[in-house]
Amino acid sequence: MAAGLSMLKFSVLLGLLSNLNLGLWPESSKGLKIFPPTCNRIECPSFETVHVGNGFEIRRYNSSTWMSTSPIQDISLVQATRTGFLQLFDYIQGKNEYEQTIEMTAPVITEVLPSDGPFCESSFTVSFYVPKVNQANPPPAKGLHIQQWKATYAAVRQFSGFVSDSNIGEEAAALQANLAGTDWAAAIEKRRAEDPTSSYIVAQYNSPFEFYNRVNEIWLLFDLEEGFAI
């Protein structure tokens, strides 16, 4: 019974993400292929596109607040994201210490720390972008923790279709290949050396019930030293 209710809630939340209306990129976000339809009607983190490369772009994200699950150990990114997503849905429906409902945002992101082998469990942390109105005092909740992001940069690759366990590694590898030899790659490697807890991030904007105009992204976060020429 509990499992059935959880799946029903999961379906309802994903249905909220459906939006088949395409928009144009706002001026600060030019250069991307497809504007995530969900961001036409619900809040998404703000950013500025500072560079467009071959198969990638560089964004500067403003400081933001995220509510995150504990690391989820699983061999499947898809299953781990579903598990974390249900926890976050309960959170925004009022299962938090303030019993406060919170507006849905996008994207839902999954931080990935891959395992050492193909049949070993990886570590996944699923996060929900906290709306600006709640960022000063996000409701705490058992099993979840707050991540405060300072202003940060991200190398981004966008791809369509459905995220699967078979294609996500290929998309992450393609982003790495496109970045090879650039100054951005050096900055990313420096960030990884300082913080090895996350290898890359998968950002998902669409409900699984949307079959067209799907938008997903791979993010590689990094910092830039003062004086770096963009």
Image (cartoon, rainbow, N blue to C red):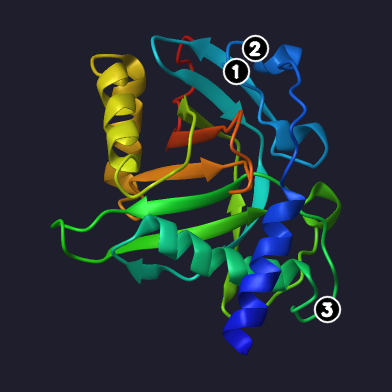
What type is the residue that disc 2 sits on?
Answer: Lys
For marks 3 and 1, give the CA distance.
36 Å
Counting residues from the start of the chain, the first of labels 3 and 1 encountered is 1
Q: Nearer the viewer, residue 133 or 20?
A: 20
Q: Is residue 208 left or right of residue 77?
A: right
Q: In what element is the residue under mark 2? A: loop
Q: Where does the image place residue 112, in percent across and percent down from the top left?
A: 37, 52
Residue 71 position in % (x across, y down): 42, 68
Could you say where residue 155 lies in the image, as x and y percent from the top left? Answer: 44, 27
Q: Nearer the viewer, mark 2 or mark 3?
A: 2
Pick whichever, 219 or 38, lies toward us.
38
Residue 136 is left or right of residue 10, and the answer is right
Q: Residues within 10 Å of mark 2 (few under 14, many from 20)?
A: some
Q: Nearer the viewer, mark 2 or mark 1?
A: 2
Name of the residue lying farthest toward the bottom:
1
* Quarter residue 197 falls in: bottom left
Q: Quadrant of the N terminus?
A: bottom right
Would you name the residue on which mark 2 appears?
A: 30
Pointer 2 with pointer 1, Cβ within 8 A: yes
On the image, numbered disc 3 is attached to which residue? 98
Secondary structure beneath disc 3? loop
Task: Give the CA distance from mark 2 to mark 3.
Answer: 39 Å
